[in-house]
Amino acid sequence: MANTDRGRALIASGLANHRRIEIIRLLQARGSLCVNEVATECRIDVATASQHAKRLHEAGLIKKRAEGRKVQLFPTRRSATLLGTIDLLWESPAD
């Protein structure tokens, strides 16, 4: 597998979890949230939200910005494109 295929797999694996999809949808709806807010909204603990944020960041699906002790999360254009594509695939019948 070429390095470009590994990169593509990393992007796809970033959303290969229903919680990470939920987090991306939340960030797109709100613009940005801190990890604690994500944890509260998703009803998960902060450590789990942080791990999901790490995976999403590694895949280039969110940006992180430290603001004091908080880490603010922002969706990227890549995440919007990927979610839109997944939604289209979900709505299309499989042959």
Image: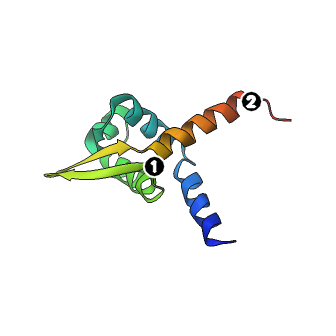
Residue 61's mark?
1
Dot 1 falls on a residue whose secondary structure is: loop
Task: State the residue in front, 38 or 86.
Answer: 86
Q: Is residue 31 visible?
A: yes
Side of 65 where 1 appears, left or right? right
**Residue holding disc 2:** 92
Colouring method of the image = rainbow
Q: Residue at x 33, y 39 (%)?
A: 38
Dot 2 falls on a residue whose secondary structure is: loop
Residue 26's mark?
none
Image coordinates for residue 49, horizontal then vertical, percent: 36, 47
- Spatial distance from mark 2 to mark 1, Cα to Cα? 24 Å
Image coordinates for residue 21, horizontal then vertical, percent: 50, 40
Tell me which numbered mark, 2 or 1, is placed earlier along the sequence: 1
Quarter-of-image position of residue 92 = top right
Q: Residue at x 31, y 52 (%)?
A: 64
Number of other residues with Cα within 10 Å of mark 1, as a class: few under 14, some 14 to 19, many 20 or more: many
Tell me, yes or no, whether the two marked residues, 2 and 1, touch with CB atoms within 8 Å.
Answer: no
Task: State the residue in front, 80 or 94.
Answer: 80
Image coordinates for residue 65, horizontal then vertical, percent: 25, 51
Of the 4 image quadrants, the one containing the N terminus is: bottom right
Of the 4 image quadrants, the one containing the C terminus is: top right
Whether residue 58 is situated above or below residue 38 in the rendered picture: below
Number of other residues with Cα within 10 Å of mark 2, as a class: few under 14, some 14 to 19, many 20 or more: few
Q: How many marks?
A: 2
Quarter-of-image position of residue 8 = bottom right
